[in-house]
Every structure is written in structure tokens, then in C-alpha cells.
Image (cartoon, rainbow, N blue to C red):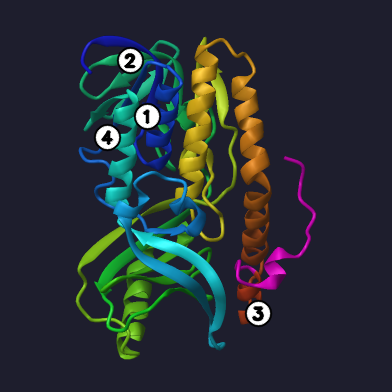
Amino acid sequence: MNGRSKVDVLVIGLGPAGASAAAEAAKAGARVAAIERKKCAGVPVQCAEFVPGPLAADVPGFARAARQAITAMVTLAAEDSAQETPDYRGQMIDRAVFDQGLVEAAKAAGAGMCLGTAATSLDADGVRLANGGTIRAAVIIGADGPHSLAGKVIGAVNREIVETRQITVPLLRAHQATDIFLSLDYRGGYGWLFPKGSLAHIGLGVSPERRQALKELLAALHQRLVAEGRVGHEVRGLTGGAIPVGGLLPAASKLGETHVLLAGDAAGLTNPVTGAGIASAVQSGRMVGQAAAAICKGNALAAATYTQDLEDLFGPSLARALHRRNELLQKSAPTAADLKCGWIASPDYWLPYERPSP
């Protein structure tokens, strides 16, 4: 995309949210262009690769990306005994294959794709690209992650972040559960072991002020699991990144006559406690693609309807998670019981609380 071009809908970012948005908008008859700074969608993988069960039936071609069924969750808090949550079902996936499948579906729907192209700035006159081109659109969809350029321009910024680091190692014993490690050392986050066939992802998320300790903390967790005979020494992969944990952001605004809509991580849809965001990215991507196409057809209420739909669908669960997260962070010396109460496997997590007005 060199020079100047004009489309109905421009999607920035081709992760699950952006690819889903591009497909839906194109299906609805909009002229769609989508740009992605990565040269290959989903690569490198920056994800623990677990998705909940319902998504499997909702995404065409999901089976190509599925790698292992998950049947339960095991929670380990401080020195307390393990707590198993049965029937916690989902799938470990190959995230690169998953993302690429969504991009192919968007192409098949008629969306124009341009990978290896970054947006450098945007305003009422259009989106400027790193290659010198400019694209104008009636609707810009920001699906460009936790540090979204589109979000920054409209003042919707993810200010609360968890920093993560993850390694991939051999899995020595077959395992069908996601293991969650809660510790005072993991302030603002948690540790995990997610099995994926003959391999396992071991990772940690912590608040930014603990970022410098991530490498050491993860090494200690790895060695603990090696000593237990569960995983091997060899590190076969390393990744990391930022996860937004501040809850739902205002997801619609205008720059002059151009509508700007946000989806996925850019809209703050990642769960503030678990960090889960793939399912909400796909769902919000579909919703925002439909809203963008409706705007292009003259529906003046489509943007407001989209933001209300986001609140209805995601608002309560995100607000509860944010409340539990903040409740735990406010404790100077949380106990093992406190750590458990702040995690989704605990019945106390689901107790009623007073939610502030959205």
C-alpha cells in the first residue's frame, strides 16, 4: 500500500480481533483494508495458547490449530495443598496456526491484506504507514494490542499492565490440566504451567515494578518443576509481553468525520485476573466489524450500539476481575487465603460485591 488510497474500513492489527473484524466487515459488503506490522501473522507467538472450550465450536478451522485438550485446573497457593477444579475445559492451540487461519478467512471474505506494514500515525486525514503510504477510511478499527496507536489517539490507553515471561520446555509426564501458581512473589500476577503435548509452557506475570525479578522468578519456578520430575531442563522457546489488566476502555470516538473503534486488547478486554483474551478478541472483532460496516451504510447509532454491546457482554466479568485484583493489591501482606480468594477457582471470587457504575 504505497501512495494514497481510500477504503470504507481500515483495520490496524491482524491478531484474532483484527482478522475477525476484517472478515465480518468484508462479509457485510464494506471495502476493507487491513495492515499488520508483523510479516507473518501470529509470529512470533506471545501467548500461553490456552483458549476456553466454547471457542472451539465457534471458529471455522479451529481443529487445525488445536494441540491438546484441557480438562481441569489445578491451583497452588503459597505452601497450601493443590486445589483441583474439575471440568475446566478448553484447548491448547498453536497460536500461529490459529491467527493465520483467521487471516485466511478474512482474505476469503474479500478483505485486502498488507503484512509487514506498520502504522506510524493517524489523524483526521488518514493513517500514515512506515512505507510512506497513507490510507483514508470512514472507519478505523484499532486492533493493535495493549499499546494501541489508535487507542492513544482517541485517549483510550491501557495504563495498567502486567509484564510476562514464558519458556517452553519438555513435559516429562502427561498432564491434562492448567496449573496455576499463586505467590506473594508474583505480585499483580501468577505463575503457570500449561501442557501442550510433549511440551509445556511455564510462565509468570507480575506488576511492572517487579519486572526486573521476572527472569529469576521464572528460573526458580522452572527448577522447582524440574526437581518434581515434571519437566526437563532444556529451554526450547522464550517469549514475553505486556497484558492489559485495567478493564474495559472507551472503545469508540471520532477524528473529524472518521470513526475510530477499538477491539481486543486495545479495548482493554483482557481479563485483569487471568490475562485471558483470545476469546474476547475474536468476539469483539466480529462485533466491531459488523458495527464498522453498519456505519458505512449510514447507521448513525452503530458505534454507540457497539460500545453498549461490549459493556453488556464483557463489562460485568471484567469489573469483577478488576475489583478482585485491586482488592488483593491493596493488601500489604496477603495470606495464602487472600491469594486464593483473588483467583477465579475460589468460590469467594464469585461472591457479590458493589460494582461502581460503568
- Secondary structure of the residue carrying tag 2 is strand
- Callout 1 amino acid: Ile
Q: Disc 4 and disc 2: Cα gap in Å?
A: 15 Å
Q: Disc 4 and disc 3: Cα gap in Å?
A: 43 Å
Q: Is residue 128 above or below residue 308?
A: above
Report the residue at 49% width, 59% height from top: 53
- Callout 2 amino acid: Ile
The answer to whether mark 4 and mark 1 are in CB contact below 8 A is: no
Name the residue that disc number 3 marks: 337
Q: Main secondary structure of the magenta part?
A: loop
Q: Earlier in the sequence, mark 4 or mark 1?
A: 1
Residue 275 appears in the rendering? no
* In magenta stretch: residue 345: yes
The answer to whether mark 1 and mark 2 are in CB contact below 8 A is: no
* In magenta stretch: residue 288: no
Report the residue at 71% width, 70% height from top: 348
- What percent of the width, then of the height, locates residue 242? 41, 51
Front-most of residues 254 and 185: 254
- Secondary structure of the residue carrying tag 4 is loop
Name the residue that disc number 1 marks: 12
Q: Earlier in the sequence, mark 4 or mark 3?
A: 4
Name the residue that disc number 2 marks: 135
Residue 248 appears in the rendering? yes
Q: Disc 2 and disc 3: Cα gap in Å?
A: 53 Å
Q: Earlier in the sequence, mark 3 or mark 1?
A: 1
The answer to whether mark 3 and mark 1 are in CB contact below 8 A is: no
Number of numbered discs visible in the structure rendering = 4
Report the residue at 63% width, 43% height from top: 313
